Amino acid sequence: MLKKQSITLQMLLSVMSITIMISIFGIIFNVLNSINTQKNSFIYQSELEIKLIADFVSAPLAFGDTLAISDAFASLKHRESIRYATVYSPDKNALVTFNPYDYEVPKQMQKIESLFISDNPLILDFGLYNQTIPIKQDESLLGYIHIQKKTQSITDSTKDLLVKSLIFLLLIILLTYFISKSLSRKILHPIIHLASVAHRVANSKDYSIRVKHNKDNEIQTLYNAFNTLLKDTDSLTSNLETRVQERTHELEQSIEALKSVQTQLIESEKMASLGSLVSGIAHEVNTPLGNALTGGSIIVHETKELTRQINEGTIKKSTMLKSLDVLNESSQVLMLSIKRAADLIRSFKKISIDQSVESRQKFNLYSYLEEVLLTFHNKLKKVPIKATITGDKELVVNSFPGSYAQIFSNLIQNTLIHAYNKNKKDAKVSISIVNNGDSFTLIYEDNGDGMDESIIKNAFEPFSTTRRNMGGTGLGLNIVYNLTTQKLHGKIKLDTSPDNGTKFTFTIPISEN
């Protein structure tokens, strides 16, 4: 509870509580001690009083003069504290009683006693005091005397003491309150002022503010320490701001340099991809061109032979027909080979233009991916890897075909380089297309070596490669990730484990406004 209050109130309540507790304990001790003292004094006075009365009545009692005893009791009328007094015979029967208020007096003495009797549970009501002593003369028992007294004097004195003590306690509380208030203001005000200044410094960040205290004491020491702290903080802040500006400038330069290097590496990766494409096309075109060259050579040879025989006039019909069959077959081979080479060159031209010119257009995804696979036909055949495309053949997307060419070129390159270093048996690559309505799913999967956990967690990070010393840039999958998420606004998921192949799942919108 106190923790939620101000330090001034905490100090005030603490001092007040301690003062009140000490005062109450002191009052209780004083009252109890006073009661004990008054009771002892009351008993002592009562003993003197009863002995004096016993001396007065001893002579009349010895002669059996009850009238003289009554006359002796008459002097007790002025003592208001005595309720009654009784003289008993040696056999404990009442002889003479002083009872001005007609209280009930026992006719038979009970026992010799000296005690306080009270039926009232109140702590300040001490009840009645009973005292009995024997009356003797020369060791001879003459009888007994019993008196009963009021204790109102003790009660009145105690109440008076309590009233005075409570008044004293109230004065102590008031005095403590004003003294504590004054001291707290004197002691805590500089600290509260310091807290206020500290709060202002924290809000304004103005470390040039200083605090002042005119007295040479502990508060002045605290103020000096606070001012020193502000001075050091101001100096450190200024130096830190300068250093931050310098580091920020250096960091900006480093970032620009990194961006430049990354751009160059990405361009290099693109060129490497195109170079790989050119290499694949060269290998693919080489076969049909070789066949075309062979067919053309045969046609030239047969044509020269026919021309020679015609000029010499030695040509026969059978020879003519045979040569025409050869020429016809060779021309068909020539045309098919040239057509095959033309198709390859057209695919290469389309893909290379798509990768270099980033323009949105509608295209059949299935057919386009077939053309991409066609450019890698020769390299896939060398492993050998069986590549297939399945799924929706009619899906038309409005997107960037060059991005798809670059994505799948990088994936196929990764497969060729990394997937089948351990086992090349029954190597397969599959691409499947699933139309989901507003989006479509592309799945690229191989049954190669897969990746371990250390590679998976950094697979899409730039410059992450296991073949850095063999010319790898580590940008292939990073380019795939960036093209998918930023250019095509899609998502990519990688599923792989050692010796269980690798699977890339792409979810991409079919078209964008």
Image (cartoon, grey):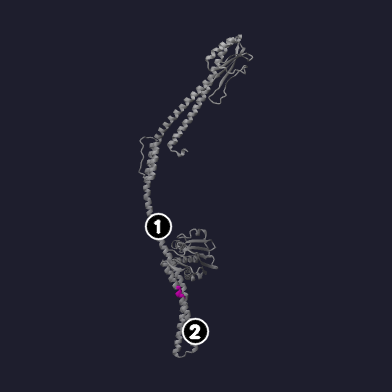
**Depth order, front residue of 239/197:** 197
Q: Which residue is mark 1?
A: 255
- Marks 1 and 2, how far apart in space? 70 Å
- From this viewpoint, which residue is outermost toward the front? 102
* 1 or 2: mark nearer the eye: 2
In the image, the segment drawn in magenta is: 340-344
Q: How many marks overall?
A: 2
Name the residue located 45 percent from the left edge and 90 percent from the top edge. Answer: 312
- For label 1, the SS is helix
Q: Which residue is mark 2?
A: 325
Q: Point out residue 389 in the picture as x, y percentages from the top left corner.
A: 51, 68
Q: Point out residue 289 in the picture as x, y percentages from the top left corner.
A: 46, 76
- Placement of the C terminus among the 4 image quadrants: bottom left
Left or right: residue 207 versus residue 127 is left
Tell me the tag on residue 301: none
Q: Is residue 342 magenta?
A: yes
Overall secondary structure of the magenta stretch?
Answer: helix
Name the residue located 40 percent from the left edge and 40 percent from the top edge. Answer: 195
What's the residue type where badge 2 is placed? Answer: Asp
**Depth order, front residue of 37/289:** 37
Q: Point out residue 458 in the picture as x, y percentages from the top left corner.
A: 48, 59
- From this viewpoint, which residue is outermost toward the top? 63
- Residues packed near mark 1 inside 10 Å, few (<14), some (14 to 19) or many (20 plus): few
- From this viewpoint, which residue is outermost toward the bottom? 313
Residue 86's place in the image compared with 368, above or below, is above
What's the residue type where badge 1 is placed? Answer: Ile
Q: Earlier in the sequence, mark 1 or mark 2?
A: 1
